[in-house]
Image (tube, grey):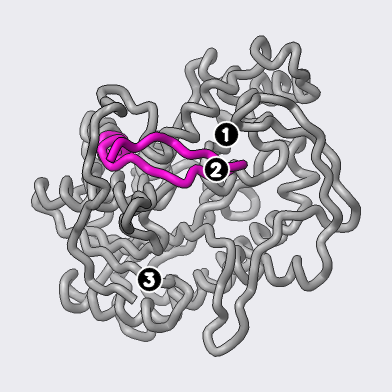
Amino acid sequence: MIIKPRVRGFLCTAAHPVGCERDVQRDIAYVARRAPITSGPRNVLIVGASGGYGLASRISAAFGAGANTLGVFFERGADGKRTASPGWYKTAAFTEAAAGAGLYAGNIQGDAFSDEIKQQAIDTIIREMGGKVDLVVYSVAAPARQIPGGELKRSTLKPIGQAFSGKTIDFNTRDIREIALEPATIKETADTVQVMGGEDWELWIDALRAADVLAQGCITTNYTYLGSEVTWPIYFHGTIGKAKEDLDRASRALAAPMAGVGGSARVCVMKGLVTQAAAAIPGMPIYLSLLFKVMQEAGTHEGCIEQTQRLFETGLYAAEPVAPDDAGRLRMDDLELGRDVQDYVKANWNVTAENLAAVADFDAYRDAFLALHGFGIDGVDYDVEVDPVRTFAMEAVL
């Protein structure tokens, strides 16, 4: 079939297999140009491994440090006239590239929140990875979570305490329109914390410790985003912010268990980037468009792979790592939160349709969003028919 992007609201319902493959190959090439991370991990478990910072971490570990990797994810393959999800195609591309480099790349497709998938990961680590992992990356962004033995919890993107009003950009028309959200209920806030907070991260580490598959000196990380104060009313001070606060709680709670294997737990604060989740947050298209404009002009823009590579090189595996902040987090958002960048964002926050093209780079935002799904990638002919089916080895399908 000939595959073109199909965008509905903040969702793109198609993905291009060749474009996704080229995107992964581009990230691998970036890592390959860097100096090897000689003190890096050897066996890595990535929970949420098929896109964003999870996939970038997998690429940095494998092609920067020569690590074997086991990825857990929930994606869909091609079905009839529907393409696979971008994460499916990108995992297929990564798996092929890793095999070509002589690296183990195991894949577990299923619900990362479930006890069954946790056990499947443990069994695979024992069977295929020598019984130990020395890095556990948790990078799950999910709209809902089935509590083991309990009800289905759903996350909510809402302010807390008072209603929110602001602006966003329509992806297709580029119109700037007003948006309004009512405050979350107590239950909505609590459910969001259970879905997107640190509880399941703790459950993963508990299960891995109980099975004795954490290597001496093992590090576990979880990614978060704090953002700029202009986005705080809907993000940091909203339901998502409460979930992010819970990651800090979980990191502190995991300190003692990880110390038991001579290891540590770190929350890593990353830069604001175009992701499927970010596209759904009111105001973020404006914020990220402004960020693209000022950071690209300054030469400081980074994507997921540049961020994870810098984290590995200067934070997790550096001889003299960057110091954590007062909360113990590793900060990779330092360039985004630089004074010049934030002064520019604040000065142009009330962007209008008339000055959008002058003060923001919505085209770069739009290109980055489409690239998530394999579109707009250099060297890909999107007028040529392609087979939407891609297969790769799985450890389990549940």
Which of discs 3 and 1 lies nearer the camera? The answer is: 3
**Crowdedness near tag 1: few (<14), some (14–19) or many (≥20) residues, C-alpha within 10 Å:** few
Q: Which residue is mark 1?
A: 334
Q: Nearer the viewer, residue 221 or 390?
A: 390
**Which amino acid lies under the numbered mark 3 shown in the image of this protein?**
Gly
Please report whichever mark, 3 or 2, sits nearer to the chain's N-terminal start: 3
Task: Determine the CA span between mark 2 and mark 1.
Answer: 6 Å
Q: Residues within 10 Å of mark 2 (few under 14, many from 20)?
A: many
Asked if disc 3 and disc 2 are in contact, CB closer than 8 Å, the reply is no
Which residue has dot 3 on it? Answer: 110
Residue named by callout 2? 331
Horizontal placement of 258 versus 163: left or right? left
Q: Are marks 3 and 1 in contact (CB under 8 Å)?
A: no
SS type, badge 1? loop
Question: Residue at image x 69%, y 16%?
Answer: 356
Q: Amino acid at mark 2?
A: Arg
User: Is residue 20 found inside the magenta-colored segment of the image?
Assistant: yes
Task: Decide: is 321 above or below 146.
Answer: above
Q: Residues within 10 Å of mark 3 (few under 14, many from 20)?
A: some
Q: Is residue 132 left or right of residue 224?
A: left
Provide the residue span drawn in magenta.
1-24
Give the CA separation, mark 3 to mark 2: 31 Å
Residue at point 58%, 68% (across, down)? 144
Mark 3 / mark 1, whichever is N-terminal: 3
